[in-house]
Image (cartoon, rainbow, N blue to C red):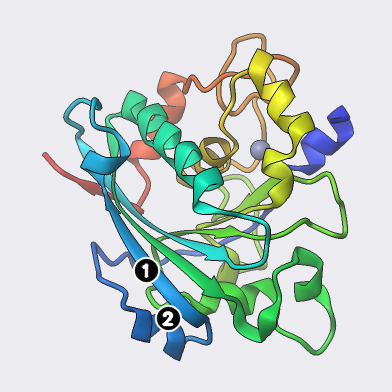
């Protein structure tokens, strides 16, 4: 994938403060009421996500919406999620609970580009439809048709810029380009987890990349890595999305 597209793959937006709700059960009825069709809910706990992670000082709860017919499957997503749980143990953060909803999207829109059509649902509408607001939400969508090589992007209340799209704050969007063969092959030589990368933007509230000589998860220049720098872990631990455990 061209470097230009790697950079475009990490487009960012802006944000605002949220009230964070600690662990809340979201039921299938809640999802249905919000406009998602035939939701199937799976609650995943820390033990299932990372059995060998050490005790953590912080916990993170998140909601994941896998849009049916987008091309995403649980088989594609769960290994990425489990690896992400392992990666965040570097920062003494435990992904404590993930509410995974497989659902038909409101208005049947699975492609990113469809949410930009005038007169229809927008991604902000999609974000607002998640029953519990204020937690980290991840959407697994089809291709980003306005830029077919884009793999993912995130939105948060960035430290260094003013955002005009607070409805999208604390959200990660991943497209099916995340697991096409070309991208998968790149990752063989440069292990790198896109979900963990986009989450790091949100949790550190850093919309930019750190393409420095030192390797780190926010560096997308040439060689990539899943290592998180101590400074970035410190920012993660300041995130209002986390719960302090001890
Ligand atoms: Zn990025």
Mark 1 CB lies closer than 8 A to ligand 1: no
Image-quadrant location for residue 180? top right
Q: Position of residue 97 (x, y in %)?
A: 28, 53
Position of the N terminus by quadrant: top right
Residue 103 position in % (x across, y down): 52, 73
Residue 10 seen from this side: no
Q: Counting residues from the N terminus, which is met first, the one under dot 1 or under dot 2?
A: 2
**190 or 180: nearer the eye?**
180
Residue sitting nearer the eye, 115 or 38: 38
Q: Are marks 1 and 2 in contact (CB under 8 Å)?
A: yes
83 on left or right of 177: left
- Percent across and percent down for residue 54 are 20, 25
Q: Quadrant of ligand 1?
A: top right
Label 2 packing within 10 angstroms: few (<14), some (14-19), many (20+): many
Question: What residue sits 16% from the left and 30% below the top?
Answer: 55
Is residue 89 something that shows in the picture?
A: yes
In the rendered view of the protein, which quadrant contains the C terminus?
top left
Residue that numbered label 2 is attached to? 31
Q: Does dot 1 land on a helix, a strand or a loop?
A: strand
Mark drawn on residue 41: 1
Q: Quadrant of residue 171?
A: bottom right
The nearer-to-camera label among 1 and 2 is 1
Depth check, front residue: 41 or 151: 41
Q: Is residue 137 left or right of residue 238?
A: right
Measure how far apart labels 1 and 2 are at the Cα level. 9 Å
Position of 46 relative to 220 (above/below): below
The residue located at (36%, 29%) in the rendering is 86
- The image position of residue 193, as x and y in percent, is 56, 31
Q: Nearer the viewer, residue 1 or 155?
A: 1
């Amino acid at each position: 994938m061209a470097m230009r597209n790697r950079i475009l793959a990490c487009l960012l937006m802006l944000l605002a403060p949220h009230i964070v709700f600690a662990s809340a059960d979201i039921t299938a009825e809640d999802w249905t009421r919000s406009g998602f069709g035939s939701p199937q809910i799976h609650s995943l706990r820390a033990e299932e996500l990372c059995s060998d992670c050490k005790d953590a000082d912080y916990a993170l709860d998140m909601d994941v919406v896998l849009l049916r017919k987008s091309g995403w499957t649980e088989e594609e997503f769960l290994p990425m999620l489990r690896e992400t749980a392992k990666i965040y143990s570097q920062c003494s953060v435990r992904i404590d609970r993930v509410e995974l909803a497989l659902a038909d999207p409101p208005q049947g829109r699975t492609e990113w580009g469809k949410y930009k059509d005038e007169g229809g649902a927008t991604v902000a509408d999609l974000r607002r439809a998640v029953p519990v607001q204020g937690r980290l939400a991840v959407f697994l969508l089809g291709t980003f048709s306005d830029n077919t090589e884009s793999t993912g992007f995130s939105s948060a209340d960035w430290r260094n810029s003013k955002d005009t799209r607070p409805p999208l704050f604390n959200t990660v969007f991943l497209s099916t380009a995340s697991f096409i063969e070309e991208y998968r092959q790149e990752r063989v030589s440069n292990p790198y987890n896109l979900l963990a990368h986009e989450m790091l933007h949100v949790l550190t509230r850093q919309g930019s990349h750190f393409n420095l000589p030192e390797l780190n998860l926010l560096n997308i220049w040439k060689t990539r890595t899943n290592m998180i720098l101590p400074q970035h872990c410190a920012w993660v631990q300041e995130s209002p999305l986390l719960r302090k455990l001890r």
